[in-house]
Amino acid sequence: MASIRRRTKKDGSMSFMVCLRDPANRQEQGITLPTESEAITLKRLLDANNQ
């Protein structure tokens, strides 16, 4: 199951990281996106495909 982390950049703007675990070796991986709506869409896609 994926999760979303809110990240603050040095310039004060926000980015969003979708975090998930690799099923093969259980290491956490993340994909950074510029908007929360894109992060939510990616999280839903990953959860729907059991990633």
Image: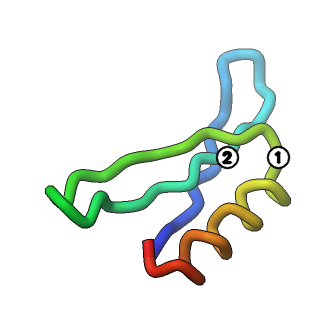
Instruction: Give the residue number, with chain letter if any, for mark 2.
Output: 16
In this view, the residue in front, 12 or 38, is: 38
Q: CA distance from mark 1 to mark 2?
A: 6 Å
Q: Is residue 6 above or below residue 37?
A: above
| Relative height, residue 45 to residue 9 (above, below) | below
Q: Nearer the viewer, residue 24 or 10?
A: 24
In screen coordinates, is 36 left or right of 8?
right
Q: Residue at x 56, y 54 (%)?
A: 18
Q: Quadrant of residue 20?
A: bottom left
Q: Position of residue 7 (x, y in %)?
A: 62, 40
Q: In the figure, 47 relative to 30: above or below?
A: below
Badge 1 amino acid = Thr
Q: Is residue 41 left or right of residue 21?
A: right
**Residue at (73%, 66%) from the top-left corner?**
40
- In the rendered image, which quarter contains the C terminus? bottom left
> Which one is nearer the viewer's eye here, 16 or 8?
16
Tag 2: residue type?
Phe
* Mark number, residue 43: none
**What residue is rendered at 80% in x and 54% in y?**
38
26 lies above or below 49: above
Residue 44, position as x, y percentages in the image: 67, 75
Mark 2 nearby-residue class (10 Å; few <14, some 14–19, many ≥20): many
Quadrant location of the N terminus in the rendered image = bottom left
Residue 16: horizontal and vertical position, in percent?
Answer: 67, 46
The residue carrying pointer 1 sits among few (fewer than 14), some (14 to 19) or many (20 or more) residues within 10 Å by Cα, namely few
Question: Which quarter of the picture shows residue 41?
Answer: bottom right
In the rendered structure, are the residues bearing label 1 and label 2 in contact, judged by CB atoms less than 8 Å apart? yes
Q: Residue furthest top?
A: 11
Point out which mark residue 35 bears: 1
Where does residue 46 sit, x and y in percent of width and height?
Answer: 56, 70
Q: Residue placed at 76% from the left, 16% from the top?
A: 11
User: According to the image, what is the colour scheme of the structure?
Assistant: rainbow
